Image (cartoon, grey):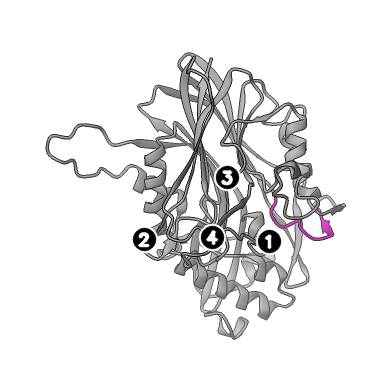
Amino acid sequence: MARAAAVGLVCALGLAQLTGVAQAKSSGKKTGHQLTVMTRNLYLGADLTPALQATSVDSAVDAAGQIVNQVHATKFPSVRAALLAAEIKKEKPDVVGIQEGAWWRTATPASLTPVLSGSPTASQTDPAGGDFITDLLTQLNKSGSKKKGKKGATLRYKLAVAKTEFDIEMPVNGGSGGLAAASHNERLTMRDAILVRQGAGITTSNPSSGTFGTLLQVKLAGALPINVTRGWAAVDIRVHGRKFHVVDAHLEAFDGQATNAGSDGKVYPKGGIRQAQAQQLVGTGGPASKSNTILVGDLNSDSPVHGDQVSPGDALAYQAVLGAKFKEVSPAVPPFGCCVEDPNLANPSKAGITHRVDHILTNTKKVKFEDGALTHTYAHGLWSSDHYGLASTLLIK
């Protein structure tokens, strides 16, 4: 769930018909081994705002139905998984941080019990919704046909670690008619994950994950308190004899109101919940507090000095990360990395890179930015995601 969704996906620079890669390079000669890192928000397939803002059971069920329709229309299993896999294969990253690795599952009959109890039970993957991580890995590891006389092995990736986060199950209908028209339940499970390229000389160890202590609390149907679970995933990697701690995170997107309720009972100002999550991430004992850390992810935040802060409060989380001695090791701004204005991903003229929420950062001097790319694809009538992918080739000492 990108912050852009919460603010109406406000992007203005048109990049119609682009299937492009924006490149940026540092100056100087290469003085070390290379490590390519990528962060990719997959886009869960729909804007959740209508469900989060619903004020009655019937309006919440209608919103859930509209969301599922939008998920089916954005075609992750049949279209977008292959587009995203092609982008990753083009950049050949050694490590990929994934956000919004959604998993859509169904169950019958329609029932409010899973949402009222807080215990989702639907287990059948929705074939039109998809299991994003599995679908992406299937496309990444698919063996392509080799042309005669051509050499080269298929790139292969493995799942190093995954973190289950926001997990909710609701009755859904065709988009109207309330609970009485609900035909089945649909379950959304959000995940962050880290993928590692096989055959690249990288070994992994100590996979770990966790949930942030401060979460946004919303009231579903205007009454039922729901915590929007978010967290982080991490793994240690060894490459060329050097060891790094890689952390992937997705900070809160929907705390854009003047005041926002936290799961801890406190009230936070705009951007305050994601700021608290960032402080936990990089603070003493946090998953990104270790030396030689590479932090990737959708922070839903950037610095106003880049000129792309959408509204006051958006910069708080990014400033907390920079305050912990992290530095950006990705293409300079501009270009930025967000977003497609159309949540249906279908309008070829609605693609702008007007602000940055996706980042690759490090707290070690053993890593130096060499060059990087923004990746995005429009094909088969859809954009690959509502975010651009961000990749950096790093020199490691």
Q: Nearer the viewer, residue 186 or 325?
A: 325
Marks 3 and 4, how far apart at CA:
13 Å
- Provide the residue designation for mark 1: 6
Which circle marks residue 127 in the picture? Answer: none
Residue type, numbered disc 2: Ser
Circle 1 sits in a helix, a strand or a loop, which is it?
helix
Judged from this view, the residue extending furthest toward the front is 27
Q: Residue at x 73, y 73 (%)?
A: 221
Which badge, 3 or 1, comes first in the chain's sequence? Answer: 1
Q: Sequence-wise, which precedes: disc 2 or disc 3?
A: 2
The secondary structure type at the circle numbered 4 is loop
In magenta, the rendered stretch is: 252-262
- Going by the numbered disc 3, the residue's amino acid type is Pro
Whole-Å distance between the Cαs marked 3 and 1? Answer: 22 Å
Whichever of labels 3 and 4 marks the residue nearer the N terminus, that label is 4
Q: Quadrant of residue 360?
A: top right
Amino acid type at circle 4 is: Gly
Q: Position of residue 374 (x, y in %)?
A: 50, 44
Residue named by callout 3:
335
Frontmost residue, 45 versus 364: 364
Image depth: mark 1 or mark 2 in front: 1
Q: Which residue is mark 4?
A: 14
Residue occupied by mark 2: 78
